[in-house]
């Protein structure tokens, strides 16, 4: 069997993640959804007063993602595919660890402005991505989405990095550039790399992740251009 086959990786990854999501994920998914929703609502209402708890939540979430998805799922993929799993999955643990470090740095030295008042209307183009990431309806290959209200509590948000990053980066994109730049860059890097890979294998649920990554990258480039113009003026 060709261990470099994208089909083999897709089957192996599907088996591993389904066991995870329908196993321990059934018990912890509602916890991630409920706590995240409460914190996001509090941040929207009270702004910077809840910035610290917002950061702590995502530190815990990305710590879980790094340990379970980045490390444990890597081990399970290695068991199924051998060392060739790195060809498809190799960067993911490093990207998650980099994101985690930047969340921790944000806790030590806060830079995120979470006052969501007076946001330009065009910035809300990411709102559907945020909502989709939180809901993240189940998707079956060659069939499509199976929309269910149960996914508002039991979807892969919090369990898997793609929907979680749609929410985290989407919220920060509303306020960019008034955010922690390194954290924003790390989330954008993950979104562009992983989102592009998901487009390549035609995994439709993560197309919004790629869109968000490209949009965030556009904002970064635009911000750099504006800074260069100001410095040269």
Image (cartoon, grey):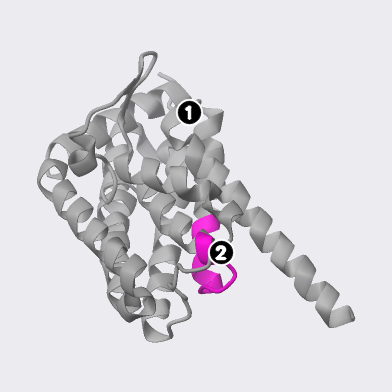
Above or below residue 84? Residue 218 is: below
The residue lying at 16 percent from left, 44 percent from top is 25
Residue 88: image location, x then y, percent: 47, 38
Mark toward the start of the polypeptide (2 vs 1): 1
Residue 142: image location, x then y, percent: 39, 14
The residue lying at 33 percent from left, 38 percent from top is 136
Q: Place residue 82 in its image quadrant.
A: top left
Q: Could you tell me how many numbered marks the image carries?
A: 2
Q: Does the stretch in magenta take in 215?
A: no
Residue 90 in view of the camera: no
Q: Main secondary structure of the magenta part?
A: helix
Q: Place residue 135 in its image quadrant.
A: top left
Number of other residues with Cα within 10 Å of mark 1, as a class: few under 14, some 14 to 19, many 20 or more: some
Residue 157: image location, x then y, percent: 29, 46
Which residue is under mark 1?
A: 4
Please give the range of residues in magenta. Answer: 174-188
Q: Place residue 153 in its image quadrant.
A: top left
Query: Is residue 231 left or right of 86 when viewed as pictured?
Result: right
State the mark number for residue 185. 2
SS label for mark 2: helix
Above or below residue 49? Residue 96 is: above
The residue lying at 39 percent from left, 24 percent from top is 8
SS label for mark 1: loop
Q: Nearer the viewer, mark 2 or mark 1?
A: 2
Nearer to me, 89 or 98: 98
Query: Is residue 149 left or right of 136 when viewed as pictured?
Result: left
Q: In the rendered image, which quarter contains the N terminus?
A: top left
Nearer to me, 72 or 103: 103
Q: In the rendered image, which quarter contains the C terminus?
A: bottom right
Number of other residues with Cα within 10 Å of mark 2, as a class: few under 14, some 14 to 19, many 20 or more: some
Above or below residue 60? Residue 70 is: above
Nearer to me, 206 or 127: 127
């Amino acid at each position: 069997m060709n261990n470099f086959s994208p089909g083999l990786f897709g089957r192996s990854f599907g088996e591993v993640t389904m066991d995870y999501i329908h196993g321990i994920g059934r018990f912890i998914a509602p916890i991630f959804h409920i706590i995240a929703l409460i914190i996001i609502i509090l941040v929207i209402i009270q702004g910077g007063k809840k910035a610290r708890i917002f950061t702590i939540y995502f530190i815990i979430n990305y710590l879980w993602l790094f340990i379970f998805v980045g490390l444990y799922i890597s081990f399970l993929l290695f068991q199924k595919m051998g060392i060739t799993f790195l060809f498809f999955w190799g960067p993911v643990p490093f990207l998650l660890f980099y994101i985690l470090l930047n969340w921790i740095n944000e806790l030590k030295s806060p830079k995120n402005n979470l006052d969501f008042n007076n946001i330009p209307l065009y910035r809300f183009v990411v709102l559907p991505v945020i909502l989709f990431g939180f809901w993240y309806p189940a998707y079956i290959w060659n069939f499509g989405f199976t929309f269910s209200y149960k996914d508002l509590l039991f979807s892969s948000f919090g369990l898997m990095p793609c929907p979680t990053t749609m929410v985290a980066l989407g919220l920060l994109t509303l306020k960019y550039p008034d955010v922690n730049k390194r954290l924003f860059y790390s989330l954008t890097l993950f979104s562009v790399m992983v989102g592009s890979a998901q487009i390549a294998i035609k995994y439709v649920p993560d197309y919004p992740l790629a869109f968000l990554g490209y949009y965030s990258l556009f904002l970064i480039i635009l911000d750099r251009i504006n800074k260069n113009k100001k410095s040269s003026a």
